[in-house]
Amino acid sequence: MKLSRLEITNHARIADLDIQIREHLVIVGANDVGKSSILRLLHLVLGSSTGQLYQHLSPVDLRDPDLPLVVTVTLCGFTDPERGLFHREIAVDASDDSESLRIRLDVSPDVDDTESIVATRSFPDRGDESARLSRQQMAAIGWRYLPATRGSGPSQMVGPNSALRILLDGLDLGVEKLSLGSLMDDFNTELGGSKVLSDLRKQIAGHMSKAMPHNVQTEDLVVRSTADPESSVLENVSMFVNRGGRTVPITEQSDGLRQLMSMTLFDLSEGSSNMVAVDEPELHLHPSSQRTIADLFTSGHNQKILVTHSPYIVQRFEPSQVVAIGRDSKAHQVAKHKLSAVEKVRSHWWSPRLLEALTARFVIVVEGVADRIIVEGAASALDISLDRLGAVVFELDGADKFAHVYKVLGKEGFGAHILGLVDDKEKNPWLGAFGGRPKNVLGRHVWVSKEDLEDEYAAAFGGPGLAQVLIDANIAQEQALLMSGNVESLEDLTAETLAAYSRKDKVLTATAVANALTRTTARKITSVTALLDELKRLTSE
């Protein structure tokens, strides 16, 4: 059994959505757009008791207080035992005999108490609105959820509900149980015969007799292992790491290693579950460990539902399995008929560098590294924090690559909000990718540097000013600059001459220019300033 569709309407944090779930589901997006709320709603439908519904839901979860919040999940891929448990609830499509099971959570305002709600789960296709999800059916669904608020302390690592405990309790020791139990019996016998421990028991018994209404004899007290040799020989067994000749408990490892071990054990312990949901599996993990965890997730037989900011995890999943939540909390996934276009460019563009853009509120797309350096430098000079605004600058390594990237990030892909910066001679393919009339795209989605960015920043500094910047940065010698302009004085150098000189090594020159930018000079780079002004306007909406 696995999820195939999710519908949400009238939630306070999440825009109404209707998404297909294709094998796995990886939810990405900027902070505070509702990603974790989607996971929590799934948990309420598939893994929570009725009491937990009322504990975790309230009227503030309803966008329109006069309408119900409705969450509908569709499940498919049933085994015979699952069909037996849900034989009244599973619907069969007459056209292709496909099976599906819908479970709906309705959360309505309580007409008698404005601070309360009425929550019900039902099977829309059963035709009996009074039918409720039984405990046996909930267990058969096989949903497991690991929230982002999880810890990696001792209780999570080796506690009674830990993944390690589940794995140990699930072991079938077979004939080894008898031999281990015999060893434990021998150990307890040795404890019982110890003179030192007998003296301790005698001392404790005497002391207890003074406080209790009856005498306590030494024989009334027993020192033994807490594990029962007859039933639970592994009760107090834990796991250790051999390191440098020392045996170190897993609870005493570094935060990162504890988290990696915790995630690994969790994935292993939930092997019998149908659906495993994890919020931010990358917590405390190095990028290489994030890739390792993602590989474990994709290789397992059960369905994974993830919320992540990690491009290294997203990269391990198919584009069809990713849903991006935009800054307006709307969900975007590649439409089925557009998947082939995305797959064609996947090998080159489905990379951490591009996927980082999926977690941003805004993506500023530029032609190359030099353009990125200037945009970031201008933003810094103008006291605009791109990180705070949720914007990333993504360089293409060539203006001709824009059409390919737009297939992934654009409105037919994951719906990222793109702001493009391009040289004048390269603008037409960019305008064509957005579609519509150029006047409706220019200044809203695309900004054009005339003739290019080198021309604009050279004009901003002026010929002599930019020449001095390059000299101070040890990028150019004065004599070389004079020769390039065929003049005898720096004051005679034109902006056009310096722009041409800067194009010889765009990245090195851009670095020097970015470091030298002031608020005044940055404002004179008109295409960049206009783009950043629009970014500020959008973030203030």
Image (cartoon, rainbow, N blue to C red):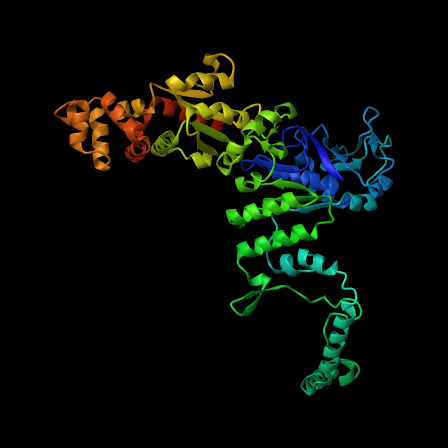
Quarter-of-image position of residue 316:
top right
Residue 78 coordinates in the image, percent (x, y): 80, 38
Q: Is residue 137 left or right of residue 61?
A: right
Would residue 492 be visible to someone looking at this image? yes
Q: Nearer the viewer, residue 131 or 266?
A: 266
Question: Residue 86's image quarter?
Answer: top right
Residue 536 pos. (x, y %): 44, 27
Q: Nearer the viewer, residue 480 or 388?
A: 480
Q: In the rendered view of the protein, which quadrant contains the N terminus?
A: top right
Q: Residue furthest left?
A: 488
Judged left or right of residue 9, residue 451 is left
Query: At x 12% / y 25%, what residue is drawn?
Result: 488
| Image position of 95 with respect to 298: above or below | above
- 526 shown above or below 286: above
Q: Looking at the image, can residue 278 be seen?
A: no
Q: Nearer the viewer, residue 207 or 283?
A: 283
- Numbered circles on residues, count: 0
Seen in the image, is 271 located left or right of residue 369? Answer: right
Residue 203: horizontal and vertical position, in percent? 69, 85
- 395 is higher (above) or lower (below) than 52: above
Residue at horizontal 59%, vertical 61%? 251
Residue located at (51% from left, 25% from top) = 404
